[in-house]
Image: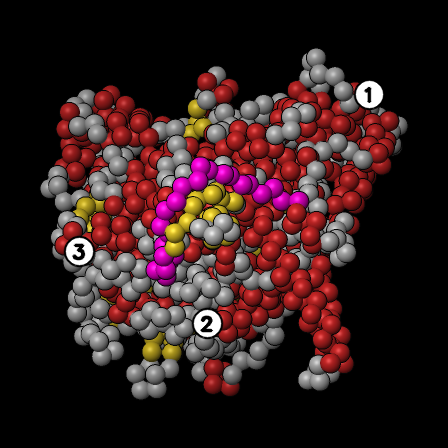
Amino acid sequence: MKNLKNDLNKLDELSRRQFVARTAKAALGVSILPVAGTSAKVLAAGGGTAEHCIFFYMAGGMTHMDTFDPKPGTETGGKTAGIPTGVPGVELAEFMPQLAKRFSDIAVVRSMTQKTGDHRGGSYWMHTSYQPRATIIHPSMGPWAAKLLGKKHETLPDSVVIGGGGNHPGAGFFGPSLSPLPIGDPDRGVQNSDLPEGVSDKQFDRRYKLMNTFDETFRSEFKTDEVTAYTQFYDETLKLMSSDDLETFKLSNEANYDQKVAAYGDTRVGKGAMLAKRLVSSGIRFVEVQAGGWDMHNDLWNDIPERAGSLDMALAALIDDLKAEGLFEKTLIVLGTEFGRTPKINANGGRDHHPRVFSGMFAGGGIAGGQAYGKSDKLGMAVEEDPVDPRDFNATIAHALGMDLNKVVYSSSGRPFLVAGHKQDRASGKVVSEGKPIAALFG
Amino acid sequence: MKSLNQHWLTAISALFLVSTSVQAEMREWTSSDGKKLEAEFVGTSGAGATALVKLKMPNGTTVSYPISKLSADDRVFVKSSLPDDPMALAAEIDKLVLNNMKKSYYGLRDEFVAIPQNTELTNAEKAKRRAEIEREMKMCVPNDMTNDSQFMRRIYLDLAGRIPTYDEAERFLESRSATKRADLINELLETEAFSMRMFNYFSDLLRVRDSLVMGGGGQLKATAYIEWIKSSIRDDKPYDQFVREMLTAEGTVWDNPATGYMVTDNGMRLCNVSNTFTVFLGTEITCAQCHDHPFEQVKQIDFYRMASFLGEYDTRARDGMNYRAEVERMSKVLLDAGKLRPNTVFDNRLNLILGTKRTKVSDTGRQVVELPHDYKYDNGEPNQQVAPAAYFGDTVNLEKYPNPRLAFADWLTSPGNPRFTVNIVNRLWKLAFGLGQIEPVDNIPGHLDGQAENYELLKFLEQMMVDQGYSIKDFFRVVCNTQTYQRKSENMSPTLTQIDNGSYHFPGPILRRMSAEQLWDSMVTLTTANPDEMVSRGAVEYREVMNVDVTELKTADQIEDFKMRFSRIGNITGGESTMMMGADAGRIGGERMVRASEMPAPQPPGHFLRMFGQSDKTLIENQSTHGSTPQVMALLNGSITNKVLTSPDAYLIKEIAYGDGKKGDKIDKIFLSVLGRYPYPHEKRAAASGLRARNDGETPRSDEEKEIAAIGDVIWALVNTREFIFVQ
């Protein structure tokens, strides 16, 4: 036991040294990791062409019946009509006209399924490939990419979550050094990065000098690692505040700002998509855009035109924008949610939680567009063909980005985990990936 | 500064040794290994588990016997002669700490001297080892004692969870009483601030979230459970009883708040077993859920035998009440009165509130734990049920108990459980000193000897906890009165090897960054006259609301009133909020400045508390004190340092800097408020230069504006120092 403890602590020591080293390198939650190449096998299977990922997460449970898998004219279809996509027999809901026009660029998955009808549990599973446990937090996909693929950019963070809520699993047991940088409001960029109103540069310098004077005695007596690390964080933050890196997070500096806002939509999801594009063009690998308001228990048809419409606009503008910059083929766009909504319309004109079947979407980054993968049944109640669970969903993301699905990463207590969930292979006894990429999506 | 030349004997002889004498009396004594002896009882020296018993032999010689070497009967006989006051016990702890440190010091010195003769090491390795030893030897000399300022700030942060207010600081520093440190310890242990501080600790350990159940829509409130924890601390409920009440509680969380613990892992029974072991026994058995533990003596079947103790309780109420029908009836009433949202006919909120009535802890008598479907060892079959049994500690006689959960609670909290008491003293020691006697604290080995930093000390603390009836307050009363605690913080970081080997011997406490809650609560202290005054209370109201007979709610007004009462549960009360109700309560400079223990938990990720590492309450001890860039940006540019502390409503500005009838220098007062000390001359000069500064080319200002700006600069600068966020 003593030896195991020693080994684990050596790991800790390494991460502590890195923790200190990293402050000298970069400040926005960045760490030094070895860069790994994508294996030939993954490349042969069409994976690994995506260098970036923009993950749209529809919090609350996006209705599949009224977005990507409409059932017009059936007893469960409600008031939602369908519109043609150019692919015979495949329609999108009427609220998504822009995506219908760009259907040749997107692949819709209509056979998503999972087991839990509670928001937190469902969202957790979608983000991590694991069901929640009260003894560990599993990492989400952005940190997994950093862990398995290495750092993407010298000074910028590897992953960013825009508009996230309180329950994002973040880097889980990978620890804070791989945590996604949270951005609350896309318009406001990194929290507290500007001098407060009314404080001039001159006053700031004066204060800072005063702080150093007051702190001299303490810092010369206590030269512990922790105190030194904090002092380095101060130095680095000052550098960061005057560096170009922060510009990356300032949406208002985007060229043709007004024109772009008009295209993406002046909405949370629109601005989120716009910022995500900006971050991706600056070299950040994984950006998650969270958009809420999908928990439509009441009066669904009052909310859906605007909710689905703003998503439609944002995704369409993003596709166009990425194409214009030549980034579409390098950027995987993914859309996910914790569950769908009941085909049966409830007494309040809404739909309730429905994990049995729901929809997702993929585009760009090596995805063959113009297809609907998997099928729900006639009424949208259950999967009829090709079920895809959250592990397969994440395996697809991992595959597109060129991650090794079978790479085992151990938690600090020595438990093995894989990017798309794990199981024990009966024949070899080895721990292998439970999730399988959707091969049909890779042209 | 401490020096290596400091003589060990002076440190030891400086200790106050307590001796007592009693009337001589001849009796027969029995040693713990059964030997008998006739002798007169002369008296005792020392205290607690390490006390010596002085016996006068028939031949007239006096011998000192360690109390631990005597039989149980003999120990009872001398017990009344032993001092049990905190000072005597504190002195014993100091002795044990110093003896251990001294032993290590001489051991290291011998090794150092022998290095040249060591033929197995290269010269480079010798040099490296020499440097390591020198460093460790420096850490084997007790630090100097803290001055009053340092002690005051530390004891306030440790026991009250915040820095002292200006008035508290002034009062303590000006006191001339010889017992003022001990008096302050006693005083702080009886404050509400102490329960707030310890609540923050326990809520991280027990994962107390406002909405108790992880799924479930957030309507099952922890209000009553939170207040039960706080009052248990306030009343100094014996810790073993506190744990037993949680493990055995039955009913709903509003009628029996202690059920909050069993409800926390609702639907995750096996996780609850693992968590219970980690929290209360300092033992990680999660691995054994899936396979035999590779290093510890715990097999997979042991896990399921333990889990079977907790295999007959349920968190689902089975009272047959049709709440859905009631919600439909009440929805109809609201609809007819035009009180529902447009286009809705069913009140979802009522549904969520009444839905919580389905969560209730009871013992069903049906065992649901079984071995996993892929169980692969020879000692059991897949899906087989196994009888509850403990793999260490006392043997459990299930027949004595109406259900296995009660048996488990007794087994776990028994002083005969080798890990229960050690776990809590180790955790509390860590809270006071920054490092446990055993690290990591959730890895208490089966055999302590040789694994703990200081085995004798750990056994002493364990016995003391039992003798003091598991009083947490008494534990701190002793520990905070030790010289070990009252020494200066160590100015070097122990290496991880040192921590792992238990070779940090506590020359003083570790220098720690304030916890997120200590930091936030210190900010609250700077902004309000009485930071502990505003509290969140709602247990009584919650119980009343949930016990309303909803079938009696007939009119729309009654139903609306019911919903309104529910939504108000847990509002902040006390202090000025009696005038400023609701959303404005406690608001200063746009932020709600109320102590962390009284705020919703967890806070959203962007909140100051979360940024500085407050636990999200999903995992045990999930708080962190690591630094980050967002933290620094919050202190440099955020609203707390730029708007709240310098707001005209903030106590520091309104009363301390500009208050009526307060004399003295503004800079002195601000230093004392923020750092708990007066400024050094060079600091005072630097601060004052801002006050005298001419208009510096920015917007021209009046003298008063300049002064306010300069005061703001001083406050900003002080709060941004490392000295402020670290606990010296």
- Image location of residue B337, percent across then percent down: 22, 23
**Label 2 crowd bin: few (<14), some (14–19), many (20+), radius 10 Å:** few
- Image location of residue B377, percent across then percent down: 25, 78
Please say whether residue A359 is visible from this viewpoint: no
Chain letter behind tag 2: A
- Image location of residue B467, percent across then percent down: 40, 43
The nearer-to-camera label among 3 and 2 is 3
Foreground pick, B370 / B358: B370
The nearer-to-camera label among 3 and 1 is 3
Q: Residue under label 2, please give it.
A: A1
A79 is higher (above) or lower (below) than B638: below
> What's the colour scheme?
secondary structure
Q: Residue under label 1, please give it.
A: B702
Q: Which amino acid does label 2 sit on?
A: Met
Callout 2–callout 1 Cβ contact below 8 Å: no
Residue B381 falls left or right of residue A442: left
Secondary structure under tag 1 reads: loop
The nearer-to-camera label among 2 and 1 is 2
**Label 3 crowd bin: few (<14), some (14–19), many (20+), radius 10 Å:** some
Q: Residue at x 31, y 27 (%)?
A: B540
Residue B420 falls left or right of residue B166: left
Cα distance between the residues tagged 2 and 1: 69 Å
**Label 1 crowd bin: few (<14), some (14–19), many (20+), radius 10 Å:** few
Q: Residue under label 3, please give it.
A: B398
Callout 3–callout 2 Cβ contact below 8 Å: no
Predominant SS of the magenta segment:
loop
Q: Which amino acid does label 3 sit on?
A: Leu
**Same subunit, tags 2 and 1:** no
Q: Please report the bounds of the magenta region as a residue range.
A: B14-36
**Same subunit, tags 3 and 1:** yes
B699 is higher (above) or lower (below) than A338: above
